[in-house]
Image (tube, grey):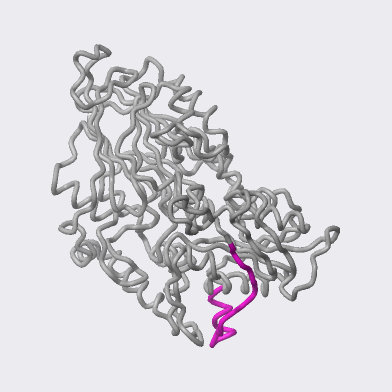
Amino acid sequence: MRIIFTSDTHGHVFPINYATGDHENSGLFSIAAQMEGEREKDGNTLVIDGGDNLQGTPLMAYYLSHRDEYDLNPMAEGFNAMGLDYYTFGNHDFNYGYEAFKDFAKAMKATLVCANVIDKRGELGVKKHVIHTLEDGTRVGITGAVTGYVNVWEQERNLAEYVVEDPIEALKKEIAELEGRCDIKVCIYHGGFEEDLTTGSVLSDTEENQACRIIREMDFDIILTGHQHKPIEGVAMSGTYGVQPPDKAMQYCVLDAEYVGRDDNRAIKGRTITHSGFSVMSFLIPVEAHYADFEKLQAANPGLKKMNEDLQIWLDEPIGRLEKEIAPEQKLECALNGSKVAAIFNQVQLEFTGADFSCSSISNEPMGLPEKLTIRDILNIYPFANTEVVKEVTKADIKEALERAAEYFEIDEKTGELCVSEAFLKPKVEHYNYDFFAGLWYEFDISRPVGDRVVMLKKLDGTALSDDAKYTLVTNNYRATGTGGYKSIARCKTIRSYTEEMPDLLIDFIKRHSPVGEIVNCKYTVRY
């Protein structure tokens, strides 16, 4: 049997970077063309996706805000072109509420498989497991699960029609149901590996990623993972074979499995024998430029061609300007010396909520802004549908949060230079977990131990923070849960929460304050 697997495509339907207008080797239609060009799908091939599809590109942001104007869903069109058979939820697939996901699910020809999500309305057609019989008679048992951290991250209103259960317990029930009824067992897990696959060291003590635990406690033959955006061509562990593609539909996994029995002498060289006696090997296949022809793919899909044309008009709508453009900010440089982009984010949050302080992060990619701004520019620097939450905090809470930010830095033992800590690079690159705190004046000393690096903390005007006073801190709904290591923020009482999404607030802020000058709303020093 063959499995073709994608995950974390994040809205990448066409091979184009909407921020720059440049073509890129990515997208579901490109993968569909490459699959067709290299080997036609047969009755012994399954095409599967691991979730996180509705969020990530201006195309999807535009579609989700204008979907009543169109009779097709762009992501579903791409997956249908690939001949997708099965898929599961990703955590970002809940971001836009039940109706948005229902629109996607109804347009999909594939079957939605997820053991730990209960659809209260019963309109999505979710299956806890399926048994798919291949052309050669092989019975493939398939179940799936999404990381239980959906309950931590997602806004309550977006989960009103769902119950997201513990993935481990849900998968144990389904694998018991599959026992004796299939020849090979496959788990689609929107979550990653909580251990370093080379050293075995624990990477996180949270339950966000639990692939290693699933492998050890259950006898799946194949686990198809995602969420971490980490390219894993293939890993064998305790009788289970695992893979993970990177994000943005730039690569996809191809797994070939052949039944050889449990006799290791019959194993094919270079392959791994699974619990059920299947020999498995896999490859990560990059999207080739030959198949990533944007004009050709768009012309073959006239409904989406019209949507793309409408999108370009919408994206190029002027909203205002800056007094001076902001060059793309390099990660370590702006973490050391400040981010003009993050300062705008913080100013928007402070003005909108009236909080004393604000925190906002940098992105994984270098981001800047031109002098003349359009909707395209805003969605490029802030592609998430985050909302605002105001927390009641103390000086101690703020200091603990700042100590987490200070972990971003470490000193290279060979050169003595400052660099980014591996804690923010493995198992997943997470520059977005370094926050800037507006309304404050603070100092880090990186020569000191982690957890004791904040050596000065005051208000922006230089006055002291009281040990006993209560302050307000605004952050986005993602950080308000404590995700990224900010446990002190999670513990704090929520004072107010809002439904307005940050991209809309940014657009409104630019329109009202144009031309926007340089904003200085925090002061800090990093010494080592």
Quadrant holding the C terminus: bottom right
Q: Position of residue 205 (x, y in %)?
A: 57, 37
User: Is 509 one of the magenta-colored residues?
Assistant: yes
Q: Nearer the viewer, residue 407 or 43?
A: 407
Q: Where is residue 451 in the image (x, y as percent from the top left)?
A: 65, 49
Question: Where 71 sits versus 93, above or below?
Answer: below
Side of 420 relative to 282 (left or right): right
Side of 374 relative to 403 (left or right): left
* Residue that protrudes farthest toward the right in the picture: 468
Write the residue at 39% across / 42% down.
Answer: 50
User: Is 214 one of the magenta-colored residues?
Assistant: no
Quadrant holding the N terminus: top left
Question: Where 388 sits versus 108, above or below?
Answer: below
Write the residue at 39% across / 38% down.
Answer: 225
Q: Where is residue 363 in the image (x, y as percent from the top left)?
A: 48, 62
Question: Where 204 sits versus 220, above or below?
Answer: below
Q: Position of residue 37 (x, y in %)?
A: 13, 49
Range drawn in magenta: 506-527
Quarter where residue 218 is shown: top left
